[in-house]
Amino acid sequence: MPDMNYNHLRYFWEVAHDGNLTRTAARLNLSQSAVSVQIRKLEDRLGHALFERRARQLHLTEAGRIALDHADTIFGAGRDLIATLSQTGTPRQVLRVGALATLSRNFQIEFLRPLLGQRNVELVLRSGTSIELLQGLENLSLDVVLTNRVPAPDALTNFITHALSEQPVSVIGTPARLGPPQPLAQLLSSHPIIVPTIESPVRAGFDTLCARLNIDPDLAAEVDDMALMRLLCREDIGLAILPPIVVQNELRSGLLQEADHTIGLTEFFHAVTIKRQFPNQLLTTLLDRPGFNPTATDPEQVSVS
């Protein structure tokens, strides 16, 4: 049986990711017919059509999706091979980190702190949705994804979830708004409340708490970005339901403070990786350090949430 021609696979891979034969051909400085011939030869070799044309657009067939998964792994492994074996002298190591767009910036900084300022380390930081980031992890364009949501189990993926930290969630506001101590139910029912959106596990816990206390809170804002929640709380729009790490500098300075109540809610932070033949050693350094505590920070640190 003849071996696969990986040039044919490369052309397919480029078109599949571009989603447009014309654009791919122009980028590769080739004619459309030349690229089409290469893909057709791959289809002949595999015995299956890889694309189908619908409404003048190319769409992957089921065989095409399987081929793309394998091509991502093959060419990703090639990048790993070059990066691993071609370094000489003192290598400049790269760690590619994806983070949920709504995740606390303070938490991200504390996770990466051991690598910050190292001259031989380059950090590539990207934010996005869970779907975008996990796809980046699968195609090896990311080394790790930071999130507060564990990816759902999937028989077709091999995500590895590392529990990093759990942070208590508090009621936080300006000193003037919090005022003298008062019962929790009274506090939550007498002030506007800034909460995460309904997709957040913290929001689900807060709704359950309100039901238990038999109160109907006045929601000032439902926000999917912790940085924006922090700013709204600073502007005294209302009380915020937040992990203290998000506003740690404001708490130290006295601009904000925690209510004197334990509300029984917790936010969990995770790092998600995927099994790699050549794992990034920088990531090993971050995940294996003992006693990671993102709240134990320098009092002079500037908040980046």
Image: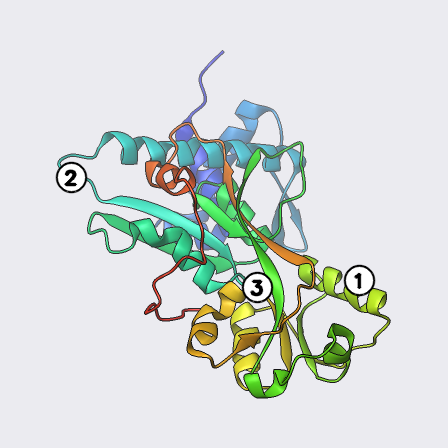
Q: Are marks 2 and 3 in contact (CB under 8 Å)?
A: no
Q: Residues within 10 Å of mark 2 (few under 14, many from 20)?
A: few
Q: Amino acid at mark 1?
A: Thr
Furthest residue to the left?
Answer: 89
Q: Which residue is mark 3?
A: 243
Q: Amino acid at mark 2?
A: Thr
| Earlier residue among tags 2 and 3 | 2
How much space separates mark 2 and mark 3, taking CA atoms? Answer: 40 Å
- Residue at 30% x, 50% y: name it: 115
Q: Which residue is mark 2?
A: 90
| Earlier residue among tags 2 and 1 | 2
Name the element at disc 1: helix
Name the element at disc 2: loop
Tag in front: 2 or 1: 1
The answer to which of 295 and 278 lies nearer the viewer is 295
- Residue at 48% x, 59% y: name it: 127
* Badge number at residue 208: 1
Q: Residues within 10 Å of mark 1 (few under 14, many from 20)?
A: few
Q: Position of residue 165 (x, y in %)?
A: 53, 49
| Earlier residue among tags 3 and 1 | 1
Q: Amino acid at mark 3?
A: Pro
How much space separates mark 3 and mark 1, taking CA atoms? Answer: 17 Å
Query: In the picture provided, is 197 more to the left or to the right than 15?
Result: right
User: In the image, is residue 150 above or below residue 256?
Assistant: above
Query: In the picture provided, is 72 more to the left or to the right than 167?
Result: left
Name the element at disc 3: loop
Q: Position of residue 75 (x, y in %)?
A: 41, 35
User: In the image, is residue 32 above or below residue 86?
Assistant: below
Furthest residue to the right?
Answer: 214
Q: Are marks 3 and 1 in contact (CB under 8 Å)?
A: no
